[in-house]
Image: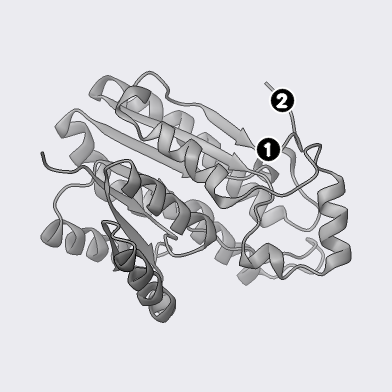
Amino acid sequence: MTKKLALVTGGVGGIGSSICRELAEKGYRAIAGYHPAEEAAAKARLSEWQAAGLDIDIVSGDVASFESCVDMAAAIREKHGTVQALVNCAGITRDKTLKKMTPDDWTAVLNVDLNSLFNVTKQFIDGMTDAGFGRVVNISSVNGKKGQFGQTNYSAAKAGVHGFTMALAQEVARKGVTVNSVSPGYVETAMTKAIPADISQQIVAQIPLGRMAQPEEISYVVGVLCDDRAGYITGTNISVNGGMFISF
C-alpha cells in the first residue's frame, strides 16, 4: 500500500520536527520544509530521522515567497508525488510594541506567519480536491485568540490564520478535504528555553496547568486531525494551551 504524503512547513523547528515524527509514526511519508538559511539544521535533523528509521525527507523553500513555493511544490511532486496532508507550521516573531515596531517587523511576520498559508496551500489544494481527500492543518497560537502585549504583528497574523481556515474549510468540504487550525500556548522548545528564567517563571505562572507544553502534545493533536477518521472535523480550532485562555 502506498503511503500518504505529508508536508510540514517549518518542519525542522521544535514543533515542526515533532509533527513530522508523529505523522511518520502514523504511516505517512513526511517531508519537512525548511528555509534555505536553515540547511545545516535541516540536514542534521534528517540524519537523526534516518538513524531512527523514520520515513521523513526534507525540502527547501521560502514560504514567504510565492515563486519559491511553486518551485518547492514542483520538487516535491517530482521526487515524491502528490501531497495528501499539509501542515502550515512555519512561523517567526519580531516582538516590539507598536510604538517601536518598524514596517519591516510588521511585514516579515505577516509574510511568514499568514501570507505563507496562501503561498503554500495554493500549490496543493487542487490536488487534494481532485483526489477527493486531503488534510490541511494550520498552526496558529493562543495569542491569535487573546492578543499579546508587544505582538500586534504576530497576534494579527495568527488571528488571520483562523479566518483563512474557516473560509477554506467551506470551499473544499464537499471534496473530502478538511481544514483546521491548532492554537498552541507556550511550548518548551529551544526558543522558549532561551527566555530568561524570571520571564519564563512569569509566563508559567499564568498557565493553570503550571508548565509549558511539550512539542509532542501539539503534534499529537495534529496527528489526530490528519487521520483518516477525522473526516468530519473541519473549519475548527483546537486550543492546546494548558488552560491559559479558555473560550468556546
Quadrant (top left, top right, bottom left, bottom right) of the C terminus: top right
Rendered location of residue 60, percent (x, y): 32, 70
Q: Which residue is mark 1?
A: 145
Helix, strand, or loop for circle 2?
A: loop
Q: Is residue 186 left or right of residue 227?
A: right
Q: Report the residue at 18% width, 61% height from top.
A: 74
Q: Name the residue furthest front.
A: 52
Answer whether residue 136 is visible to the viewer in this image.
Answer: yes
Instruction: Inspect the image, locate mark 2, and give the three-letter code of the amino acid beneath it.
Output: Ser
Q: Is residue 242 left or right of residue 24?
A: right
Rendered location of residue 114, percent (x, y): 51, 51
Answer whether residue 60 is visible to the viewer in this image.
Answer: no
Callout count: 2
Q: Report the residue at 28% width, 60% height from top.
A: 53
Marks 1 and 2, Cα distance to the nearest angstrom? 9 Å
| N-term-proximal mark, 1 vs 2 | 1
Q: Report the residue at 34% width, 31% height from top.
A: 227
How many C-alpha atoms fall within 10 Å of the one at disc 2: few (<14), some, or many (≥20)? few
Q: Is residue 51 left or right of residue 79?
A: right
Q: Which residue is mark 2?
A: 247
Rendered location of residue 80, percent (x, y): 15, 56
Rendered location of residue 35, percent (x, y): 41, 71
Which residue is nearer to you in this view: 105 or 169?
Answer: 169
Q: Report the residue at 66% width, 47% height from top.
A: 213
Image quadrant where residue 10 sits = bottom left
The residue mark sitting in front, 1 or 2, is 2
Whether label 1 touches label 2, CB < 8 Å: yes
